[in-house]
Amino acid sequence: RKGNNIANLKWLIILVIEMWLVFCGKTSAVELHVGSGQTYSTIRGAVDVAGDGDVIIVHAGSYTEHVSVAKRLTLLGEGADVVTVTAAVTSEHIFYVAADYVNISGFTVTGATGYYSISGIYLDNVEHCNISDNNASNNDYGIYLQHSSSNTLENNTVNSNDHCGIRMSSSDNNNLANNTASDNSCGIYQVDSSSNVLTENIANSNNNYGIYLQHSSSNTLENNTVNSNNDSGIYLYYYSSNNNIIGNTASNNSDNDEGIGIYVGYSDNNNLEKNTMNLNNYGIHLHYSRNNDITCNLVHKNSDSGFCLTDSSTDNIIEHNNIVENGNYNSTSGGWEWDFYNDQGCIVEARNNYWGTPDNDIVDASIYDDDESTNVYRLVRFYPPAGEPVPCAPIPIPELHGDVNHDGKLSTTDAVLALQMAVGGIDTDLAADMNSDGKITSLDALMILQAAAENI
């Protein structure tokens, strides 16, 4: 009798499995079409009747509505260039996502500007959603993740939003790749968010920051471009620790007071490696930050200083970097003021870096430390310097001789700037030194003008 019971149980299990397979076959995904001449005229109408796993295809057109997604759905627009969803009420999110495994792609969403944190696409306490190939511009926030983890944001354009292009709050393990966030207050902003991966995003020309992390740890920022932001390219702030900042480019970030390639404030144990910081006010600024590993970076032609350390930034590893031509050239000492600025009462180790020369006296003249401040505790120990550019770091690209404004070509503008340098009207830049005599004269300006005329 016991054997019969086991046999009956096996048949019951098989029957349940077969019924489940039949059931799954009967509930395959359904396509619902939205648009002129389609079954549904609004996206919201299709969402209301759709079931979990269904696909809603939105055809070309303009839609004015708000869509709340609380089911596992795929919303597929025919393309952000032909499908636009405008906020019907400016104080509501356009797409509000409250379910896991939601996919949204191929839309332009705009006009959600009426209240702080109102967004084009808002993810609320969800996981495993995919937001891709959308244009979320001209909102308060473009895309906003709140308590949402393990999501993917890819190939989105989030420009000209009042606050940030993308914001993550208390959101972990998300993947952001190939997004463009420009002309916002900040490009990508995350707070209380950890273990996110940001790769190959572009965050340029924002009013404040390209990428901003606050109280966010164990994130990876790799191969991102953060140029021409008014404050800083990458900004790590208040207990943003154990982050990997690798292979990013931070250029032309400038402001009257700030303008920093990468800023690390009140944050420890970060790894900065293989980044390029050039043509900013400051290349790298550490403020009250300790035990950071800063190796194999290019810090080049930043106008105020390459490195700036303030307020007890101690026990950092600073080595194998190419630190070249930062600040202003001093024709008397041969140094650059300043490649390295130690504005704190702490001794700093900065050995085995390349400073553009193996000459110890010139390197020392390029470093602001105890010699300049009369505070012996500001010493920067740079010896031995590397004798040539370190191969693990990006190599400085030789500039076009005479290209004073660094736009990649010679013009009358360069000649005018060189003439202003010759009469002491503006700071000296050796890019204007056409005859390589270590000083800028009217002859250099004339030579630039002649070279520019030949290139016309």
Image (cartoon, grey):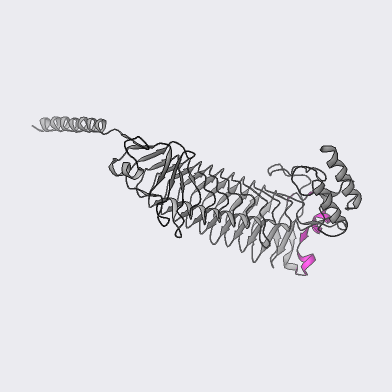
| View extreme (bottom): residue | 374
Q: Is any atom of residue 308 visible in this view? A: yes
- Residue 409 drawn at (x, y percent): 77, 42
Q: Which residue occupies 26% across, 30% down?
A: 25
Can residue 360 be found in the magenta stretch?
Answer: yes
Q: Which residue occupies 86% across, 60% down?
A: 424
Q: Quadrant of the N terminus?
A: top left
Q: Is any atom of residue 358 visible in this view? A: no
Q: Quadrant of the C terminus?
A: top right
Can residue 415 be found in the magenta stretch?
Answer: no
Is 108 located above or below residue 367 in the figure? above
Instruction: Give whichever of 64, 235 is nearer the camera.
Output: 64
- Residue 34 drawn at (x, y percent): 36, 38
| Stretch in magenta | 352-375
Q: How many marks?
A: 0
- Residue 362 drawn at (x, y percent): 83, 55
Is 314 located above or below residue 108 in the figure? below
Is 310 located above or below residue 449 in the figure? below
Instruction: Give whichever of 336, 132 is nearer the camera.
Output: 132
* Horizontal relation, residue 283 to residue 444: left or right: left
